[in-house]
């Protein structure tokens, strides 16, 4: 009896037709059932912009990958650009880490103390290993830096690239001049940078002296100053 009742019922399936392209277009631009807030409209506009311009997103990534392959040393007079020695990859990274350390400490400039910390942060150069072997570590240098220069205002914000102090600029220039004077081929290494810091009456030299560095140790560094030139970052 139940089967008879079931069979007697008639079913009319609903049409399953898909909307045409013109209908989809009209549906896409159909006004919303309720008004959108200005904030939601802004988010939707940003999403549409990112979806329709994927090339812009790629170009931003490419920009952030740009790195510097030199240091801001002064060009010696009478030396053509093609004759200028290049900085080693370790020296360039040490300089970049020094800038970053100056920003962490909220200092307005990159001084010789920051360059010294950059050498120790990079950590793989002969100069950095020599300093650590003689008890001159990053933590000790940072502690002496704060003692000597003090803490910066907590509300101060360092620039992205804190400009060099005059002694720090002279330390870079000394490293270039010393490499040219030696007549040796190859790159300007982290050892040259360390000796440049030691050559200037500055915060970096005072901190090194406080931690036991002296002229005898500087002479030892000078003997190995060209041993980092074969290394490069890829």
Image: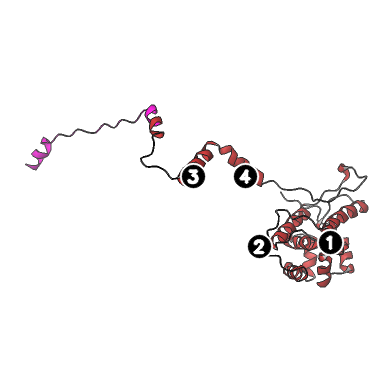
For discs 2 and 4, the disc positioned in front in the rendered view: 2
In the image, which residues are magenta? 1-24
- Marks 1 and 3 sit apart, C-alpha to C-alpha, by 51 Å
Residue under circle 3? 43
Q: Residues within 10 Å of mark 2 (few under 14, many from 20)?
A: few
Assign a secondary structure to mark 3: helix
Q: Which numbered disc flags the more N-terminal residue, 4 or 1?
A: 4
Circles 3, 4 touching at the beta carbon (< 8 Å): no
163 w.r.t. 139: above or below? above
Q: Which numbered disc flags the more N-terminal residue, 3 or 4?
A: 3
Does residue 142 appear in this view?
yes
Q: Which numbered disc flags the more N-terminal residue, 1 or 2?
A: 2
Q: Residue at x 80, y 61 (%)?
A: 112
- Marks 4 and 1 sit apart, C-alpha to C-alpha, by 35 Å
Circles 2, 4 touching at the beta carbon (< 8 Å): no
Residue under circle 1? 197
For discs 1 and 2, the disc positioned in front in the rendered view: 2
Residue 131 at what x, y percent from top left?
Answer: 79, 66
- Marks 1 and 2 sit apart, C-alpha to C-alpha, by 29 Å
Residue 181: give its label: none
For discs 3 and 2, the disc positioned in front in the rendered view: 2
Q: Which numbered disc flags the more N-terminal residue, 3 or 2?
A: 3
Q: Is residue 188 magenta?
A: no
Residue under circle 2? 155
Q: Residue at x 53, y 40 (%)?
A: 50
**Which picture quadrant has residue 153?**
bottom right
């Amino acid at each position: 009896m139940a089967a008879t009742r079931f069979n007697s019922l008639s079913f009319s399936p609903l049409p399953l037709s898909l909307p045409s392209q013109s209908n989809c277009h009209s549906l896409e631009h159909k006004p919303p059932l309720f008004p959108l807030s200005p904030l939601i409209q802004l988010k939707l506009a940003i999403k549409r912009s990112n979806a329709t311009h994927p090339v812009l997103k790629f170009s931003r990534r490419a920009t952030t990958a740009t790195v510097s392959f030199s240091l801001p040393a002064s060009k010696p007079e009478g030396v053509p650009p093609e004759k200028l020695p290049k900085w080693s990859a370790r020296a360039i990274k040490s300089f970049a880490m020094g800038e970053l350390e100056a920003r962490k400490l909220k200092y307005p400039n990159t001084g010789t103390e920051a360059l010294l910390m950059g050498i120790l942060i990079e950590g793989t150069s002969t100069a950095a290993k020599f300093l650590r072997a003689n008890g001159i570590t990053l933590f000790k240098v940072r502690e002496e830096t704060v003692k000597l220069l003090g803490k910066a205002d907590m509300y101060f914000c360092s620039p992205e690239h804190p400009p060099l102090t005059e002694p720090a600029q002279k330390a870079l220039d000394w490293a270039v001049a010393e490499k040219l004077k030696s007549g040796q081929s190859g790159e300007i290494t982290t050892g040259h940078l360390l000796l440049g810091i030691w050559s200037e009456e500055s915060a970096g030299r005072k901190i090194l002296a406080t931690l036991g560095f002296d002229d005898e140790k500087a002479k030892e560094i000078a003997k190995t100053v060209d041993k980092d030139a074969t290394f490069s970052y890829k």
